[in-house]
């Protein structure tokens, strides 16, 4: 696997660096999957469908808006 550097806001950077190694690997896999789908997307409609599919997958895996908000606040 290769490494890239992307800019994120301070809250995201802090949450990521404070996460344990397993959480960081999980986050990296999700972002990698998202980017892979994004670069293979040729239209805005496909992009929206991809985001909807990722949201559905996250929900199936137990991620709710409340849990996401809690995770982000937890790392502040």
Image: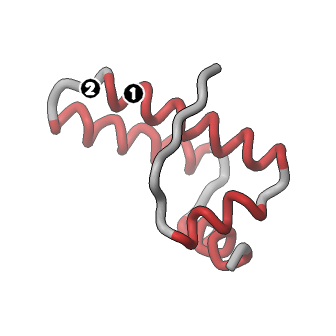
Query: What residue appears at the point 48 percent right and 67 percent down from the top-left corner?
Result: 9
Residue 3 picture location, percent across and down = 59, 30
Which image quarter: residue 14? bottom right
Residue 70, above or below 8: below
Dot 1: within a 10 Å radius of its alpha carbon, few (fewer than 14), some, or many (20 or more) residues?
Answer: some
Q: Residue at x 78, y 59 (%)?
A: 19
Give the SS element for disc 1.
helix
Quadrant where the image shows the C terminus: bottom right
Q: Residue at x 82, y 44 (%)?
A: 22
| Residue toward you, 51 or 1 | 1
Give the distance between the C-alpha atoms of the residues marked 2 and 1, in whole angstroms: 6 Å
Residue 10: image location, x then y, percent: 54, 71
**Quadrant in which the N terminus appears:** top right
Up the image or down, 9 lies above or below 32; here it is below
Judging from the image, what secondary structure is the residue with disc 2 in?
loop
In the rendered structure, find residue 41 and report the number of the disc placed on it: 2
Q: Residue at x 46, y 40 (%)?
A: 54
Report x, y in % for residue 48: 26, 42
Please say if the residues under marks 2 and 1 sit with CB atoms less than 8 Å apart: yes
Q: Which numbered marker is on residue 37?
A: 1
């Amino acid at each position: 696997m290769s490494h890239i550097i992307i800019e994120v806001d301070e809250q995201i950077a802090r949450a990521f660096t404070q996460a344990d190694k397993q959480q960081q690997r999980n986050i990296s896999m999700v972002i990698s999957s998202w980017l892979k789908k994004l670069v293979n997307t040729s239209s805005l409609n496909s992009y929206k469908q991809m985001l909807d599919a990722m949201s559905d997958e996250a929900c199936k895996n137990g991620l709710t808006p409340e849990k996401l908000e809690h995770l982000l606040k937890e790392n502040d």
